[in-house]
Image (tube, grey):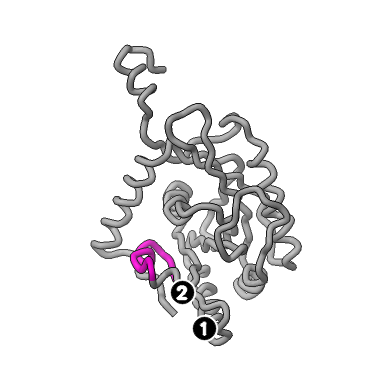
């Protein structure tokens, strides 16, 4: 198992780099719904549709004030070992002993104040909006072991008449641990809602990104709002 290695000079430098990289690639991070607050730990489960998801979650955690961690397949974390510096730790899903160790480690992390553990229950990248979602049982087991609040969040990358894409997050209703069907219903519900969005109406910007050519041109002409 690869444990997280948050903090230290390299971790702080990586924090700054990821923030810069995200803001330069996207117009912004937008949230609809209420991000939970408070000192209790929480399990946040999301659809997994893009390579950018890890960087996006880093920005979400900072915007929400969470102490964030992410469960990753060990093979992928070995490939991108630097992600351990921003809270990633590993699991080998086909190894029962390793899985138990990772579950115990996750449970300990969720006892920390303001902790948030991100999980992609689909287990791999899937095209956005394809339903029904194919969820694995790991999210159910982790929730039962940890006994924490569970929060579904849908992620969508979309263009809305701008040079750069927007990242839209739809936050669902938190719920206690339960059967896999409960997670299926929770995640599909928010995926459907965010898929139906045709504008940024109702969303709140949590992270601002780079301006496009049109915005810079309007600013130069004195027409920017």
Q: Quadrant of residue 44?
A: bottom right
Q: Which of label 1 and label 2 is nearer to you?
A: 2
Residue nearest the viewer, comparing 144 with 208: 208
Q: Residue furthest bottom?
A: 97
* Left or right, residue 29 beside residue 193: left
Quarter of the figure with the C terminus: top left
Q: Residue at x 53, y 43 (%)?
A: 157
Reading the image, the residue beneath label 1 is 98
Q: Quadrant of residue 96?
A: bottom right
Q: Do the residues bearing badges 1 and 2 touch, measured as CB atoms within 8 Å?
A: yes
The tally of labels here is: 2
Residue nearest the viewer, comparing 45 with 161: 161
Residue nearest the viewer, comparing 51 with 193: 51
Q: Above or below — where is 142 with respect to 99?
A: above
* Separation of residues labelled 1 and 2 (CA atoms): 10 Å
Q: Position of residue 8 (x, y in %)?
A: 27, 65
Q: Residue at x 46, y 74 (%)?
A: 74
Q: Above or below — where is 135 with respect to 197?
A: below
Q: Is residue 74 magenta?
A: no
Reading the image, the residue beneath label 2 is 74
- Residues in magenta? 79-89
Q: Residues within 10 Å of mark 2 (few under 14, many from 20)?
A: some
Q: Residues within 10 Å of mark 1 (few under 14, many from 20)?
A: some
Which numbered tag is attached to residue 20? none
Q: Above or below — where is 156 with respect to 148?
A: above
Q: Residue at x 52, y 63 (%)?
A: 117
Q: Residue furthest left?
A: 9
């Amino acid at each position: 198992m690869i444990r997280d290695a948050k903090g230290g000079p390299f971790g702080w430098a990586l924090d700054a780099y990821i923030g810069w990289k995200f803001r330069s690639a996207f117009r912004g991070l937008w949230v609809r719904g209420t991000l939970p607050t408070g000192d209790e730990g929480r399990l946040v489960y999301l659809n997994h549709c893009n390579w950018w998801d890890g960087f996006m979650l880093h920005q979400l955690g900072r915007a929400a004030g969470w102490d964030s961690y992410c469960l990753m397949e060990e093979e992928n974390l070995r490939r991108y070992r630097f992600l351990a510096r921003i809270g990633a730790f590993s699991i080998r899903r086909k190894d029962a002993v390793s899985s138990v160790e990772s579950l115990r480690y996750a449970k300990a992390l969720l006892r920390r104040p303001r902790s948030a553990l991100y999980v992609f229950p689909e287990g791999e990248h899937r095209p956005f909006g394809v339903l029904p979602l194919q969820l694995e049982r790991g999210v159910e087991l982790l929730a039962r072991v940890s006994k924490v609040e569970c929060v579904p969040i849908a992620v969508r990358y979309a263009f809305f008449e701008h040079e750069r894409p927007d990242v839209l997050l739809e936050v669902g209703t938190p719920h206690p641990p339960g059967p896999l069907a409960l997670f299926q219903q929770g995640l599909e519900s928010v995926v459907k809602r965010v898929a139906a969005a045709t504008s940024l109406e109702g969303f709140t910007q949590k992270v601002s990104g780079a301006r496009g050519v049109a915005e810079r041109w309007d600013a130069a002409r004195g027409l920017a709002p």
